[in-house]
């Protein structure tokens, strides 16, 4: 098919199309001048336009050129001028000639009604053109333009820029793995006697064809071999044929003496001898030519394994092959590995039209020299235009480490598509932007721009960059970015050193926290979700591949363009078929905002530092209108050191995605403990997670982790550290839904916990019981590595933070636990356990059943205390919580998951707080718990029950009364319906607020000795454990017990259990009674108490707990 297509392009044009062409010409010309111009734009070569005056300005760096007042010129030769200004009807056209043209200038300014044309869409420029921008940062003799600055191509209001180079394939995939030091070239046809590596020589008799002598010289290994070759050739008699071939590699130690002798004999290639490799591509490399330069991306964790190659002629290559000079230093995957597409991208860097900045040999004269040892004052292209279309251009050494000066910069252009009257819509396509000094493509205050088939390689700061927040409807289609390094311009561009050293805009006394304020360098920086990313690849940055960031209000020149909160609620554009790999922090992040206020004494951080933000997409960006899920479809993330994806917000849904070899595959983080978009959820469906694939990488230096791993326990590169706990799906807060996903090759090793499902490390936040998991498939995952809840040790630390203790998720169909409908909880969380729960020690978990919800306990005055919460059924197993907010906040919040319809008491390690608010979270209508709160004696209370709507900020109070007591018992019951995934009811969050006057000098409010055993209750299983899936893999051992029960008063039962063997069963009758009353009794006050008597027996075994009761 490919050969057929080439024949079609090269065949003569038949008469038919000529007839159609001229008819079309006539129709356009009889219509209007506008149609005529449009026709000329699409169908004529601009350098053939009648009336163009040949222009040959010569070479003078002092020559200032103005082209105006209807003057139209055609540049036909190379030239050097100080500057070119085109305005007032002036037009500059570059001639398409066989001779290369080099135009050197300090700047080109296209003003109102000025035009610059290089080719057209249907007549692309075929010659070789270089526009070279020269000038120094510190040159004071040149006045800086107030808008464009220095060293630029600028398009002002009303200006037109049309540049169309040859169409070439911008980038594709490697279709066969390229191994280091291998050529993939298998078309040598040598006799065995010709030997192996090196230069092989045959001396042939020209008359008979007889091989008189042959030898091999391993000039790859030894310089002695090079000298031996020179002597050998020098000794060959005149008149004989000297046949030479290079097998494998022969240039490494080939000295000049041998090269000179062979050159004298007529060799044209010995001076450029080197290793040749054949690269097999996924498609035909249309337009690629010998001497073009390409880059092959890394397929390991380090983006620095990207490699550049120069193309060589290859008459024997197939339709989708290229030959490159040199050999690969690193492995580059060219295939699907364990079901994940890990093919390296191959990007074209060379174009026949080149814009470049002329650079000094080293850094000089500006603040950037603190961080870079090279000149960063490149050229730049900036627009505020009438019309611009650019395609087929290479931009090298462009961009400056100063604000507003980027390789390609659309600045405050408004709507540039049909909505803004642009026909055809504005676009940039088929660009190669590389070795630049500030970004790749910047879109600022511009909407509807198409950026297509653009390669951005080796740049400083965010590569594809949307700036202030109002940028919408822009499309990035089939764009590739890689080797994106930190820059100095914005806090988010900076690395840790820059963040600490650059304090401009900070309030005096500011101390940088780089991982929070800065360190966000990204290949795609998207400041408004309403943009489209399709078929794009983020193939290596110092931080992140794709980052969706939020400006609560528009900043800079865009100030006032939208109402506060618009970007946090605008639905996401199309995000389809994108991929990210070889990034440090994450393949994709959807989280955070930027600080939109200037630094002050309350917030000393600089303007545009990173801050927290939450995303909840709704119709028309109105939170009172229906939700519109943000859809992420077919996203591929592999070999990212920390995360494949970190996504925080409301409805964010992933489908058909692939995650492999990431430190953590995916984390879905909710909108917070009180989600701004309550009722939303996040989900991932129909996706593949691979823990440690057969892409083992290769050791390169001491800075990259190399150790044993994978199902085969072989050496490989590792994401973070030898003992880093690799996780596929990291459950954080919720609610989330994981459905129909496959987990492959997660295997824990001695000293390293690896699991398909895991939890956020060192987590102080809540865990939602509505985290649902269903239809999970495990492939090469030992049952011991399905889940891991954590244990004290490296990376997990002491496991003493609140979120570490309260983790939970719901195994809807039992595809993880093999108990459909069961919950998996932390093994030592006795707020959630009951006697029938099954321990799984390898998971540090228990499989339980029940009805679960949460309470948020907010405290003030003081806020730095610890809370002890006790379930009455397990009074000797309190859960100690430190709070989610740290000890320096003005209030504290504790967020335990609890079992519904049970009794609890709460105690403190200091005197009780003066204010306690209990929020009912994930309570359905009529769900309840009873809770007793410990206070010092003689405390005065004010208790308010209300409903707080967090969206409208309205509160309705329903009760007020005062009591004097020490332990206050309340029954907290929900009275309103709630949506399925909402934390609170449809009317708002139901809560009880207790304000107390605490006697001065009160001791710590710990009433456990008084409360128990008086209010202890026998454990009761309210929800029976589900039946185990038949033929499942979890092992249980069942025992039965004989129980002897002693009753002490009416509130406590003691028991003694003795094992009798499997054949003995004891039927036990459970009795209970409820007493409803309210009175004040010495140290206790309560509204409802449930007392139960009965018998329970427990015996712990290796993999289970079995309770036998009736």
Image (cartoon, helix red, strand yellow):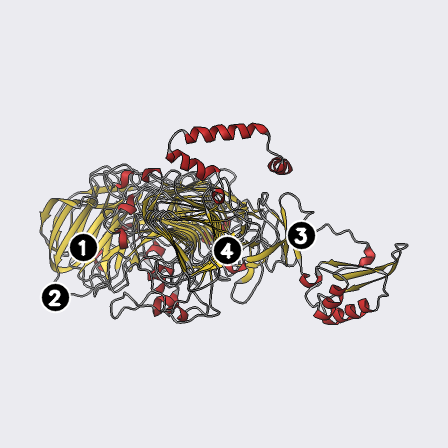
Percent of width and height locating residue 479:
46, 47
Q: Secondary structure at mark 4?
A: strand
Real-space Cα distance between discs 2 and 3?
82 Å
Q: Residues within 10 Å of mark 1 (few under 14, many from 20)?
A: many
Number of the label disc, if any, that sits on residue 1000: 2
Q: Nearer the viewer, residue 1005 or 943?
A: 943
Looking at the image, do the residues carrying marks 4 and 3 touch, with CB atoms under 8 Å apart? no
Real-space Cα distance between discs 4 and 3?
35 Å
Q: Earlier along the polypeptide chain: callout 1 or callout 2?
A: 1
Tell me the residue that label 4 is attached to. 130
Q: Is 808 situated left or right of 991 in this image?
A: right
Number of the label disc, if any, that sits on residue 184: 3
Q: Secondary structure at mark 1?
A: strand
Number of the label disc, if any, that sits on residue 916: 1
Q: Earlier along the polypeptide chain: callout 2 or callout 4?
A: 4
Q: Nearer the viewer, mark 1 or mark 4?
A: 4
Q: Earlier along the polypeptide chain: callout 4 or callout 3?
A: 4
Count of numbered badges drawn on the protein: 4
Real-space Cα distance between discs 1 and 4?
72 Å
Q: Secondary structure at mark 3?
A: loop
Q: Residues within 10 Å of mark 2 (few under 14, many from 20)?
A: few
Q: Quadrant of the C terminus?
A: top left
Considering every residue shown, the one lying at the far right of the view is 208
Q: Earlier along the polypeptide chain: callout 2 or callout 3?
A: 3
Q: Nearer the viewer, mark 2 or mark 4?
A: 4
Real-space Cα distance between discs 3 and 1?
71 Å
Whether residue 644 is visible to the viewer of this picture, yes or no, is yes
């Amino acid at each position: 098919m490919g050969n057929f297509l080439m024949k079609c392009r090269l065949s003569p044009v038949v008469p038919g199309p000529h007839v159609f062409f001229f008819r079309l010409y006539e129709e356009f010309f009889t219509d209007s001048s506008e149609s005529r111009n449009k026709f000329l734009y699409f169908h004529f070569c601009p350098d053939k336009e009648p009336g163009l005056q040949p222009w040959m300005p010569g070479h003078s760096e002092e020559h200032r050129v103005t082209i105006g007042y209807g003057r139209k010129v055609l540049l036909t030769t190379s030239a050097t001028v100080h500057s070119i200004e085109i305005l007032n009807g002036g037009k500059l056209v570059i001639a398409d000639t066989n001779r290369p043209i080099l135009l050197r200038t300090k700047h080109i300014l296209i003003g109102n009604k000025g035009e610059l044309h290089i080719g057209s869409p249907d007549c692309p420029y075929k010659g070789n053109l270089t526009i070279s921008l020269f000038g120094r940062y510190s040159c004071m003799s040149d006045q800086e333009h107030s808008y464009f600055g220095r060293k630029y191509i600028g398009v002002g209001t009303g200006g037109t820029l049309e540049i169309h180079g040859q169409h070439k394939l911008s980038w594709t995939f490697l279709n066969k793995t390229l191994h280091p030091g291998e050529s993939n070239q298998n078309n040598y046809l040598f006799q065995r006697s010709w030997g192996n590596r090196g230069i092989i020589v045959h001396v042939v008799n020209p008359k008979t064809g007889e091989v008189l002598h042959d030898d091999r010289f391993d000039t790859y290994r030894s310089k002695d071999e090079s000298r031996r070759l020179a002597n050998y050739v020098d000794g060959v008699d005149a008149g004989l044929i000297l046949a030479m071939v290079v097998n494998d590699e022969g240039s490494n130690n080939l000295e000049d003496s041998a090269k000179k002798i062979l050159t004298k004999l007529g060799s044209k290639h010995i001076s450029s001898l080197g290793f040749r490799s054949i690269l097999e591509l996924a498609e035909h490399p249309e337009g690629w030519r010998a001497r073009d330069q390409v880059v092959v991306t890394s397929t390991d964790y380090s983006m620095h394994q990207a490699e550049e190659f120069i193309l060589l002629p290859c008459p024997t290559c197939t339709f989708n092959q290229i030959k490159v000079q040199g050999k690969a230093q690193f492995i580059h995957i060219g295939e699907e590995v364990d079901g994940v597409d890990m093919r390296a991208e191959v990007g074209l860097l060379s174009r026949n039209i080149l814009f470049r900045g002329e650079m000094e040999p080293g850094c000089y004269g500006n603040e950037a020299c603190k961080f870079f040892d090279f000149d960063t004052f490149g050229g730049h292209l900036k627009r505020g235009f009438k019309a611009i279309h650019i395609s087929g251009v290479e931009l090298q050494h462009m961009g400056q480490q100063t604000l507003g000066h980027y390789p390609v910069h659309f600045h405050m252009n408004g709507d540039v598509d049909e909505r803004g009257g642009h026909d055809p819509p504005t676009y940039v396509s088929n660009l190669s932007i590389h070795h630049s000094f500030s970004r790749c493509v910047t879109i600022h205050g511009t909407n509807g721009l198409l950026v297509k088939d653009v390669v951005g390689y080796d740049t400083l700061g965010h590569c594809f960059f949307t700036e202030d927040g109002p940028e919408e409807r822009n499309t990035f289609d089939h764009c590739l970015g890689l080797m994106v390094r930190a820059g100095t311009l914005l806090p988010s561009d900076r690395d840790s050193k820059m963040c600490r050293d650059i304090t401009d805009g900070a309030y005096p006394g500011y101390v940088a926290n780089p991982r929070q304020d800065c360190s966000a360098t990204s290949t795609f920086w998207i400041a408004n979700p309403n943009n489209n990313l399709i078929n794009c690849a983020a193939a290596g940055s110092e931080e992140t591949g794709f980052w969706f960031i939020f400006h609560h209000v528009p900043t800079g020149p865009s100030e006032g363009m939208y109402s506060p909160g618009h970007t946090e609620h605008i639905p996401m554009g199309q995000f389809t078929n994108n991929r990210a790999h070889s990034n440090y922090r994450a393949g994709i992040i959807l989280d955070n905002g930027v600080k939109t206020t200037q630094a002050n004494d309350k917030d000393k951080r600089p303007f545009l530092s990173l801050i927290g933000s939450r995303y909840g997409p709704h119709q028309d960006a109105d939170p009172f209108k229906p939700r519109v899920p943000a859809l992420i479809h077919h996203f591929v993330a592999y070999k990212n050191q920390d995360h494949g994806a970190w996504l925080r917000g409301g409805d964010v849904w992933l489908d058909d995605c692939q995650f492999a070899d990431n430190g953590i595959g995916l984390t879905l983080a909710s909108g917070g403990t009180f989600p701004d978009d309550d009722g939303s959820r996040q989900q991932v469906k129909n996706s593949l997670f691979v823990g440690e694939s057969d892409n083992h990488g290769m050791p390169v230096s001491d800075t990259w982790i190399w150790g044993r791993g994978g199902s085969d326990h072989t050496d490989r590169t590792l994401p973070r550290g030898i003992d880093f706990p690799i996780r596929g799906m990291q459950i954080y807060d919720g609610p989330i839904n994981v459905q129909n996903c496959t987990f492959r090759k997660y295997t824990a090793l001695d000293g390293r916990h690896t699991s398909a499902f895991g939890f956020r490390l060192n987590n102080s936040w809540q865990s939602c019981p509505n985290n649902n998991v269903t239809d999970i498939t495990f492939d090469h995952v030992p049952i011991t590595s399905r889940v891991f809840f954590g244990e004290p040790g490296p990376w997990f630390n002491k496991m003493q933070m609140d979120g570490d203790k309260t983790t939970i998720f719901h195994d809807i169909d039992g595809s993880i636990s093999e108990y459909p409908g069961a919950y998996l909880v932390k093994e030592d969380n006795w707020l959630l356990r009951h006697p029938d729960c099954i321990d799984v020690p390898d998971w540090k978990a228990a499989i339980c059943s029940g009805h679960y919800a949460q309470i948020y306990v907010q405290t003030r005055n003081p806020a730095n205390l610890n809370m002890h919460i006790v379930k009455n059924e397990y009074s000797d197993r309190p859960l100690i919580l430190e709070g989610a907010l740290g000890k320096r906040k003005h209030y504290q919040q504790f967020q335990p998951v609890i079992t519904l319809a049970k009794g609890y008491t709460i105690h403190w390690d200091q005197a009780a707080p003066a204010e306690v608010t209990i929020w009912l979270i994930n309570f359905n209508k009529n769900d309840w718990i009873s809770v007793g709160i410990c206070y010092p004696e003689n405390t005065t209370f004010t208790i308010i029950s209300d409903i707080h709507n967090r969206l409208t900020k309205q509160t309705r109070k329903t009760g007020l009364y005062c009591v004097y007591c020490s332990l206050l018992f309340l029954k907290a019951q929900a009275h309103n319906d709630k949506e399925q995934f909402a934390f609170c009811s449809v009317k708002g969050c139901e809560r009880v607020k207790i304000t107390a006057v605490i006697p001065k000098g009160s001791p710590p409010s710990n009433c456990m000795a008084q409360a128990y055993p008086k209010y202890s209750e026998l454990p009761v299983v309210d929800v029976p454990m589900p039946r185990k899936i038949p033929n499942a893999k979890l092992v249980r051992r069942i025992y039965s017990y004989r129980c002897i029960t002693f009753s002490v008063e009416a509130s406590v039962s003691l028991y003694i259990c003795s094992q009798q063997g499997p054949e003995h069963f004891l039927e036990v009758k459970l009795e209970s009674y409820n007493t409803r009353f309210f009175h004040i009794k010495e140290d206790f006050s309560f509204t409802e108490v449930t007392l139960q008597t009965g018998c329970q027996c427990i015996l712990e075994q290796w993999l289970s707990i079995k309770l036998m009761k009736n």
